[in-house]
Image (cartoon, rainbow, N blue to C red):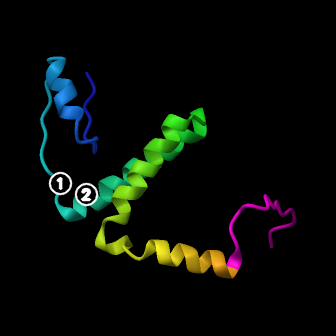
Amino acid sequence: MSSYKKLVRDKIPELLDSKGIAYEKYIASPDEYKVELIKKLQEEIVEFAEAGSPEEFADILEVIEALQKLSDYRGVVALQQKKRDERGGFEKRIILKGEKG
C-alpha cells in the first residue's frame, strides 16, 4: 500500500470518516502551509493541463484564493493590475513566433 502526505480540502476528513477510511491528520505550520499550497497548485495545474475540465480549473482557483490570503501574497491583485496596465492582458490572443537567442 502506498503512503501520502498532502494538503486536502477542509471537509475531506469528514468524507473519509463517513466512509470508514483511516487516516492521520495534523495542522500545518504557516511555513509548511505555504509550501503545501504551492505543491497543491502544481498538482492542480497538471490535472487541468491533462483534463482541461472546469472542475480542475475551479480547483486551481481555490488554491489561488488560499494563497492570496497569505501575507506574502496579499498585494498580488494590485501587482496583477499594474502588470496588466503596463503590458496588457491576454484578451487579444497574440502568439509570437521567432528564434530564441
Residue at label 1? 28
Q: Quadrant of the N terminus?
A: top left
**Disc number placed over residue 33 in the picture, else none:** 2
Q: Which residue is located at x 16 percent, y 60 percent?
A: 29
Q: Is residue 54 above or below residue 98?
A: above
3D distance between C-alphas at marks 1 and 2: 5 Å
SS at mark 1 in the image: loop
Residue 28 locus on image (x, y percent): 17, 54
Q: Is residue 16 above or below residue 46?
A: above
Closer to the camera in the image, 9 or 46:
9
Residue 24 locus on image (x, y percent): 12, 35
Residue 67 lies left or right of residue 28; in this view the side is right
Q: Which residue is located at x 30 percent, y 73 percent?
A: 71
Secondary structure, magenta segment, majority class: loop
Residue flagged by tag 1: what amino acid is it? Ala
Q: How many numbered tags mark residues here?
A: 2
